[in-house]
Image (spheres, rainbow, N blue to C red):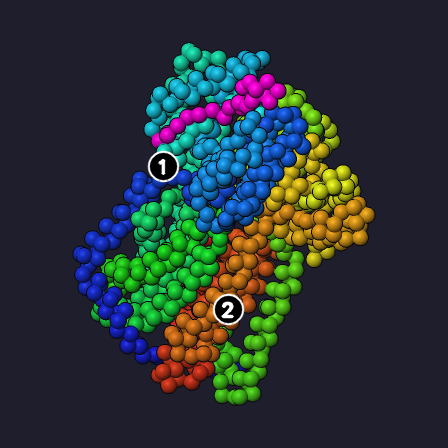
Amino acid sequence: MVKRSKKAAVIKVPKDKLLAKFTIFFFERPVATALLWILLTLFGTLSYTTLMRREGFPSVTIPLTFVGGTYFVNDPAKVDSDVAAPISRIALEQEGVSTVQAQSSGNFFTISIAYDEGVDANAAAAQLEKTVQDSGALPKTVIAQYNVPYFGATGGDVDKLDVAISFYPLNEGTPITEIVAKASEAANWLNDKKIHNVAEAFIKNPFEDTVNPATGKAISVQRSFDRYGKRDNSATTYHQSVIIGLAAVSNADVIKLDKDVRTALEDLGRDERFSSYGTEITASFAPQIKDNISELQRVLLEGLIAVLVVGSIVIAVRASLITVISMVTVLAITLGFLYAIGYSLNVITLFALILALALIVDDTIIMVEAIDAARHHHKDRKRAVKEAIQKVSRAMVAATTTAALSFAPFLFVGGVLGSFIKAIPITIIAALFISLLVALIFIPFFARELLLGKKQMGKKGVKEVAAGFEANIANFFAGPMLWARNSRKRLLLVGMSAIAVGTGFVVAGALIGRNVVFNIFPPTKDTNGVVLSISFPPDLSIEQAEQLAAEADKLAANTLGENYVQGSYFASGSPQGAMQQIELISYNKRDIRSPELVKQLQEKFNNEFTAARVAVGQLDVGPPAASFIVEIRADNRQAAFTAAHDMATFLRSKELTRPNGKTARLVNVTESSSNQYIRDEGKPIVTVSAGFDANDTSTLVSLGQTAIKDEFTPQKLASYGLAEDAVSVDLGQESENQDSFKTLALAFPILLLIMYILLSIQFRSLLQPLLIFMAIPFSLFGITFGLNLTNNPFSFFAMLGFFALLGLSIKNTILLTDFANQARRQNLSAVDSAVAALRERFRPLFATSATAVVALIPL
């Protein structure tokens, strides 16, 4: 039986003068510090409630150009050769062009040009238009428009569409030409109204002007259609409709914009000229951002209450109250900082603030606990504060810096993803350093009366609620070291046992990780929308396509029933296909989740709707879900279509086996239409596209790619008369997602190296940073175990959590190592120093870990 000292070794306070002087400067000026706190907190509160504009997502510029138009020849091959081919060739000769894709049908063409990151898409589009015109390569009857897409409420569009309004007749049988004329009149009415925050109202005209080459006369051709559905009185009714788009003024607040537009539409409805028409807002960021702000406030409130309760148990009631006040202060100042650098309150910044809640608790609790511990040893509060600062400030600076560094790789993610998520690392890094400053400046100020009053000073026998529990755990972990401290053999045994335990965690993490699937952007568990992607058979007129869409609408509405709210095609309908977005009732009011509704809809369409192919998916967050698209070079078009047919047959029957042995299949396998000509990088292609019956898209895309390569060998392709490089897989958005993900993977070892260098300087040792990094293998076990237990994939969001966890775990080991070094400088042995550090620092480490976990539970 080993006797254990119940009294921790007495460690002299290190002489860390600089930070102590900084803190004492503010501590001795309570009035000035109070005014500074009020000023910063008030500015942050005003930023949140009034100053910061609300928007759906951060404003980003994506370097794309769409060239679309008409060539009235009623021959897709001629449209392809006379228009798509020369424009593609000229575009590929432009500097900074990444990819060029073109589609041609009977009288219409669409060409998308993606540029390298950093290219000014507007300038590039203008230059392309001038070059094409100067070349004289296009027939005179071609009408082409060059547009840079704007990413608004309905996704990427050639118009700046921040709010979409479905304008529809209440009476069936109204001619489309009459609906268009009345919608134009309504748009003009809205422009004359001069709605606050609205720059312009316009219609998405389904007709396009062109020239008949046979007569040379101008004609108007219907190119698209729109339908609007609404559930009312237990029935869903669809109408022909026209989209009225609203472009917001620069830096508009989406909530104010939405409110102003709804007020204007109420006035429009009272105008007799529009009494036989209905209007509904079908796309706006306002409802989403309202829900997110509500969620943020709820999560923050619940998280802060959780911190208060846990802190009261683990430390003390007064100390936990200071922690909560400090965290609110950090969040307020962070919001003020975001406003000052021009950031808006959007989905990304709100997410970052919620995540930051678990990170900023560290500095606040460590400082509060240090002051709480010091007050028991001194009757002078200035001395207590000075001792607390000298004990923990250096470790706090090192820990906060490494935690902030753990998010630095996200600053270097490029492409569309990087543009969207850049606010996350900026917000969290700012919150971490602000939490450090709040700990050094304001926590001692808050503690003046709450912890450092005359009655609270010098009480050495005080026991908090969890003090005995914490001490017992600390002694349990210290036991093996105390048992072995006087024996080399025992020390070797304890050390080897520790290595074995650590190795066991690493091996267990790797084994469990085999069961965790990989998907960069997995679909969410439940959303408030579904998408119907309809592919029509060839040779349909636009009237026939709309009739088939009406049949699909009826089936979708009957299947969804009371879960249906409204739906719109957003002018996407054409003879080739259409895409309908359906809004569901809120998931808070539904008994069934959206994935199950998607499954039911897909089964209904597969079994009962054979007139066209319909793929059903969730209307989800993040980049668009990747499709599996195989491209076949079509220099020999007939051979390419023969190969495409065989490939589609192969994919429909192919079973994909994941590394963990589980299988998946490809669904909605579709071959491109013979009446549509497609070019990629200027070369004619035929495509085969498919989806998956599971949501680990990143893994399945890779498996599908391998399956195609193994089945369609060079010898087999030669049998079709195709070259060995005729087949390729277009990963689309998934390719960019994987490139962005690789950036994070490459940044990880660089990040560890930078952390190692900084910690080596901080601790003046090349070995101690490696000791600090020992926390990482345990973190990896926790990640794989947690993801497997909750059936979540390893994704971008999991990677974000990993970097946050990395910062937290390293902060803990930094504090332990720093205190052990203080003990070593007082001539304690290595074992006694480790034991002293564990006993002294276990309380704040346990408090920070427990409160961080509890703070995240509401999220």
For marks 2 and 1 on the same chain, the one whose residue lies earlier in the sequence:
1
Number of residues whose C-alpha sits closer than 10 Å to that of mark 2, classed few (under 14), some (14–19) or many (20 or more): some
Where 269 falls versus 395 (above or below)? above
* 197 relative position to 629: left or right: left
* Residue 200, x across and y down, in percent: 39, 28
Mark 1 — residue? 250
Residue 369 appears left or right of 736: left
Cβ atoms under marks 2 and 1 closer than 8 Å: no
Count the marks.
2
Picture coordinates of residue 499 (x, y %)? 57, 76
Residue 157 shown left or right of residue 702 in the figure: left
Question: Is 571 above or below relative to 801?
Answer: above
- Residue at screen point 33% across, 72% down: 391
Q: Position of residue 448 (x, y in %)?
A: 24, 61
Label 2 SS? helix
Alpha carbon of mark 2 to alpha carbon of mark 1: how far?
47 Å
Element marked by disc 1: loop
Q: Could you say which quadrant of the image residue 171 lies in? A: top right
The residue sitting at 66% across, 48% down in the picture is: 729
Residue at x 56%, y 22% (from the top left corner): 211
Q: Amino acid at mark 1?
A: Ser
Which span of residues is magenta-colored?
197-219
Q: Position of residue 196 (x, y in %)?
A: 33, 28
Q: Amino acid at mark 2?
A: Ala
Residue 775 - label:
2
